[in-house]
Amino acid sequence: MTTIDTHAPGAAVSSGRLAAVAEWITSTDHKKIGRLYVGTAALGLLGSLVVAALLAFERADSASNLLPQESLTQLFSTYRFGLTYVVMLPLMLGLAVAVVPLQLGARSLTFPRVAAAGFWAWLIGVVLSVVAICANGGPNGGNSRFVDLFTLASGLALVGLAATALSLASSILTNRAPGMNMRRVPFFAWSALVMSLTLLVVLPIVAGDLLFVFLAHKYPSISELSGNRALGRWAGFGYTQPTTLLFAIPVLGLLADVVATATNTRLRPRGVVLAGIGLVGTAMFGAAVQSPVVIRAGFSGLTGGQKLSDLIPFAFVHLLPLLGALVAVATAAGALRTKPTISAPLLFALVAGIITLEATAASALNHVGPAGLVGTTFEEGTWLGAVYAVVLAAMGAVAYWGPKWWGRSMPLKATAPLALLGLLGATLAALPMMIAGFADQPGGVFPAIVAGEDNATNFTYSGPKELWNTLSGAGHVLMLLTVLAFVALALRSFTKGEYAGDDPWNGHTLEWATTSPAPADNFADVHIVHSAEPLLDLKPSNRSDA
């Protein structure tokens, strides 16, 4: 099905600065909605990185008084909630909303008011969640009323994200240019569809569990797990792997699109790449069952039937996503043998794709019982890898599609080194936590608090605690510096930089067929698509082979 909708009209406003602000607040332009998500998530990223660095340095020294002891639990909640639902998912969802309709040749997003309402619901939920955490109302919080507020507010944030995902998925399924069947959908748009459909399965489950926790906390007779600690036990699967790997699926689509552009070739085999990206979506079954899908610690002593009962679910939830990520990254990397044009988006996308593959492999290993990694910081390292893969991909996406939103480009010489700095920061933040996990460092600060110890960071294990946690803290600081430098460079480039032109990358897909910056309705004419690379077909020495 292909339809080309016109842009939903916004409310009439007066002229001046107030009008400009009102236009953004009331806008149904998908490009503005997407950038609102990305900009707000960037602010959340800066705050979350500061908290992450402080927690890492606090854990490096048991005698440290860097942070008040009574605030550690709430800071850890801010760290996990912030990087997952204030940064990671909104970044990818916002980029998809801003870009995908342009790639589809559509004049608007399907249900644009639903997407806009989703953004404001998410933002209100995030603000209220942060307020509740600051008032000792997060997971394990001591203020009962604010625990309830956090539970409901975070649920509202998830409902907003689900509403935007619904609008995005509907656009890709129904609002494409004539001739663009699902085999011809751009890689990034396809990855956004896979992510959106999995979100429509996972987010309602997490939100439903949050609602149950609220009711059980309000009315303890409903469940035995009705205390403040019940939140992690009921909804914790929404903050860890494999759920968070679903949020990184568009990283693979971005990599495929950027590599195809950089090499000026049609990325083949196309169907294999699409299937690989789709396979990563099977990780949603891990969230659907709401409990870890693992190979048990005593696996070698099990009967044949018991082994199959472990291996089959494990393969669906962990091995198929790993295979899919491997196929997508390997295909893109193989295409780079044709001497690509080096660009900052290519470096960011390649680094992010490799880290995503590593995080997917680490997630599978974390759920192998004989490895003995459950309950250690190995999970945190895996989660950080997925988070920072998304952050690096988002920076690459802004550098790549920024000219289409603002009409100006970011300089290669200033932007490219940030990809390498980000790679170093992400590696330092995540890898030491994985190594510490092998040395049995307990995850987070919760184990010590539950055990009733006086010092939540007072743990001992067989590794150099100071080294690994200090390195991880240094990694967070490097990521903070990378993000700050990128944001400053982007603000300067997109306001005072060189004009980019309509097609600065010699692109293949339809977003480069309209003017830069793109108008509110995206396209003046309806484009007829004859292949998966419609813009490439119109250029000399190229032909359609779809």
Image: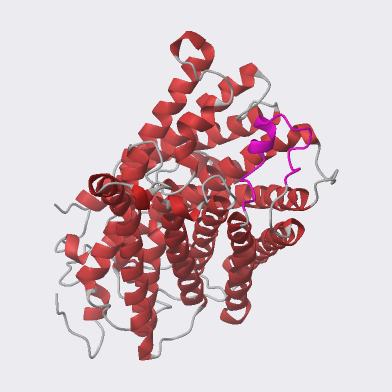
Q: Residue 453 in the image: state x and y as whole percent.
A: 74, 33
Magenta-highlighted residues: 440-459
Q: Is residue 423 left or right of residue 59?
A: left
Quarter occupied by the C terminus: bottom left
Q: How many marks?
A: 0
Examine the rendering and report whether any part of residue 490 can be seen: no
Q: Residue 115 in the image: state x and y as whole percent.
A: 38, 41
Q: Is residue 151 above or below residue 286?
A: above
Q: Residue 397 in the image: state x and y as whole percent.
A: 47, 65
Between 45 and 94, the one nearer to me in the picture = 45
Q: Is residue 460 left or right of residue 201?
A: right
Instruction: Give the image quarter of residue 523.
Output: bottom left
Residue at the spot 52% in from the left edge and 28% down from the top edge: 231
Task: Judge whether residue 455 is colored magenta.
Answer: yes
Magenta-drawn stretch, dominant element (helix, strand or loop): loop
Between 227 and 500, the one nearer to me in the picture = 227
Examine the rendering and report whether any part of residue 237 can be seen: yes
Instruction: Give the image quarter of residue 2.
Output: bottom left
